[in-house]
């Protein structure tokens, strides 16, 4: 539809932009009101099952953060090494320190764009490159979001006793990766795509929304780590492709 609407008139484009802005505002309202819903969900869970349920949330959080650390400290360095042929860790740690820490607290890839632009300039990267890749990366480079969608969907499938084959897990990974590219660069944006991924395993919508609620409960750390991975990787991959670092 986006490609087709390139042929639309100016009035239609303006209308579509206004609708997109309205939807974004509604999403922000939902996220802003989420803490009240989370309070009710946590209170209800603790009343029904005691504090044992919170231990389950902590386990999911550990899996999520562990996966993100693996991508940040193992997978990304390997990709940079294959591209540059140099020790990737000085660049990896620089990006995590200069960009990742700020993104961890802002929880917004879009808000972290100026930080990344400043870091790219400090690293001496080509401005014509990073002025395009960093804003684009803040929109579509969502590795952390893909991890969140995958892990929470697989956790739901495991809880429901649904058998997950290698093929279905691979399909889930592909769907989550592509879907993550459409995630909004605001806090909690990735959680709204979990029902889409859950539908691959015929998980009912009410269960999928409960998984989303769990995501909001642990989002203080999950979303912060997710954004730190996403935003720092934008600069890391831009630097790896720059002639200054590329072999």
Image (spheres, rainbow, N blue to C red):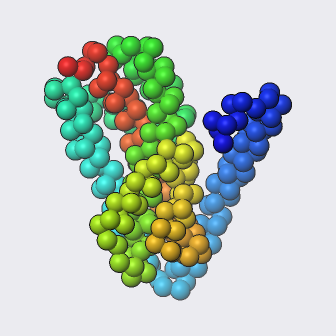
Point out residue 9 in the picture as x, y percentages from the top left corner: 79, 29
- Residue at image coords 67%, 51%: 27
Q: Is residue 95 left or right of residue 5?
A: left
Residue 208 lies in what quarter of the image? Answer: bottom right
Name the foreground residue: 158 vs 117.
158
Give the residue furthest to the bottom.
Answer: 48
Instruction: State whether residue 151 is above or below residue 95.
Output: below
- Residue at image coords 44%, 44%: 142
Point out residue 185 in the picture as x, y percentages from the top left corner: 55, 41
Instruction: State whether residue 185 is above or below residue 57.
Output: above
Point out residue 220 in the picture as x, y percentages from the top left corner: 49, 54
Name the foreground residue: 208 vs 14.
14
Q: Is residue 26 left or right of residue 81?
A: right
- Would residue 106 be visible to someone looking at this image? no
The N terminus is located in which quarter?
A: top right
The image shows a total of numbered marks equal to: 0
Q: Is residue 204 left or right of residue 83?
A: right
Name the foreground residue: 241 vs 91.
241
- Residue at image coords 49%, 44%: 181
- Residue at image coords 42%, 50%: 177
- Would residue 171 be visible to someone looking at this image? yes
Instruction: State whether residue 65 is above or below residue 5.
Output: below
The C terminus is located in which quarter?
A: top left
């Amino acid at each position: 539809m986006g490609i087709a609407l390139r042929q639309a008139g100016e009035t239609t484009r303006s209308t579509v932009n206004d609708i997109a802005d309205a939807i974004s505002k509604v999403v922000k309202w939902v996220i802003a009101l989420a803490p009240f819903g989370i309070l009710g969900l946590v209170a209800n869970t603790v009343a029904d099952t005691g504090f044992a349920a919170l231990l389950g949330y902590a386990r999911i959080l550990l899996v999520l953060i562990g996966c993100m650390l693996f991508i940040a400290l193992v997978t990304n360095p390997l990709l940079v090494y294959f591209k540059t042929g140099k020790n990737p860790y000085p660049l990896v740690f620089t990006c995590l320190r200069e960009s990742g820490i700020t993104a961890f607290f802002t929880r917004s890839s879009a808000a972290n764009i100026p930080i990344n632009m400043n870091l790219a300039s400090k690293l001496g990267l080509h401005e014509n490159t990073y002025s395009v890749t960093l804003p684009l990366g803040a929109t579509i480079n969502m590795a952390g979001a893909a991890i969140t969608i995958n892990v929470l969907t697989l956790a739901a499938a495991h809880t429901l006793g649904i058998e997950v084959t290698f093929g279905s897990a691979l399909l889930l990974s592909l769907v989550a990766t592509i879907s993550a590219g459409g995630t909004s660069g605001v806090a909690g944006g990735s959680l709204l795509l979990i029902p889409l991924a859950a539908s691959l395993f015929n998980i009912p919508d009410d269960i999928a929304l409960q998984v989303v609620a769990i995501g909001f409960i642990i989002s203080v750390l999950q979303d912060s780590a997710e954004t730190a991975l996403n935003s720092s990787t934008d600069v890391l991959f831009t630097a790896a492709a720059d002639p200054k670092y590329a072999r």
